[in-house]
Every structure is written in C-alpha cells, then in structure tokens.
Amino acid sequence: MRWLFPGETIRIEAPCLDCGEPMVVEMRDEEILLVDPDTMVGYTSAEVGGDAATRPFR
C-alpha cells in the first residue's frame, strides 16, 4: 500500500467469503498493524517467492 498511500494507515474491513464473519486488516507502508481475526489466511494466484515445490497451496 506504500506506493498508493505513503505514510498513511489503511484499514480494510470485509466479510469472509467462506463464512461471512467480519475481517479487518490495518497496515501502514510495509507494516501490518492489525489482523482480526488473528487466524486470518490470505491466498494469491500470483507466483510468490521460493521454490514451487515448497510454496503453500493456493
């Protein structure tokens, strides 16, 4: 988010697409300030780091 809102705190509130429970993420630049619930997991369809054999399932 740094390139869009440098130095600003960004808060994202959205429902879980699986169960509908509320989720919240707050970040500033490259720092994650808040994740609620703390068990939240994110997925991406992009190739993200590391060897393909050891990457988490997406």
Image (cartoon, rainbow, N blue to C red):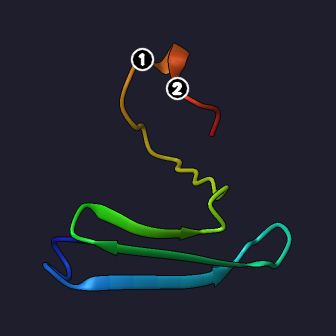
Q: Is residue 10 above or below residue 34?
A: below
Q: What residue lies at 82% left-to-right and 78% top-to-bottom? A: 20
Q: Is residue 29 above or below residue 45?
A: below
Residue extending farthest to the right is 19
> Label 1 amino acid?
Asp
Residue 4, located in which quarter of the rendered image?
bottom left
Residue 50, located in which quarter of the rendered image?
top left
Residue indicated by mark 1? 51
Helix, strand or loop at mark 1: loop
Q: Is residue 37 left or right of residue 5?
A: right
**Circle 1 residues within 10 Å: few <14, some 14–19, many ≥20:** few
Name the mark on residue 55: 2
Helix, strand or loop at mark 2: loop
Name the mark on residue 41: none
Q: Is residue 6 left or right of residue 21?
A: left
Depth check: give the residue in front, 58 or 23.
Answer: 23
Q: Is residue 48 above or below residue 23?
A: above
Q: In x, y percent, where is residue 28?
A: 26, 73
Q: What residue lies at 49% left-to-right and 82% top-to-bottom? A: 12
Classify the position of the C terminus by image quarter: top right
> Label 2 amino acid?
Arg
User: How many marks do you count on the picture?
Assistant: 2
Q: In x, y percent, where is residue 16?
A: 73, 73
Q: What residue lies at 57% left-to-right and 85% top-to-bottom? A: 13
Q: In x, y percent, where is residue 36?
A: 61, 71
Q: What residue lies at 21% left-to-right and 69% top-to-bottom? A: 29
- The answer to whether marks 1 and 2 mark residues whose Cβ atoms lie closer than 8 Å is yes
**Circle 2 residues within 10 Å: few <14, some 14–19, many ≥20:** few
Classify the position of the N terminus by image quarter: bottom left
Q: Is residue 10 above or below residue 44?
A: below
Depth check: give the residue in front, 43 or 23.
Answer: 23
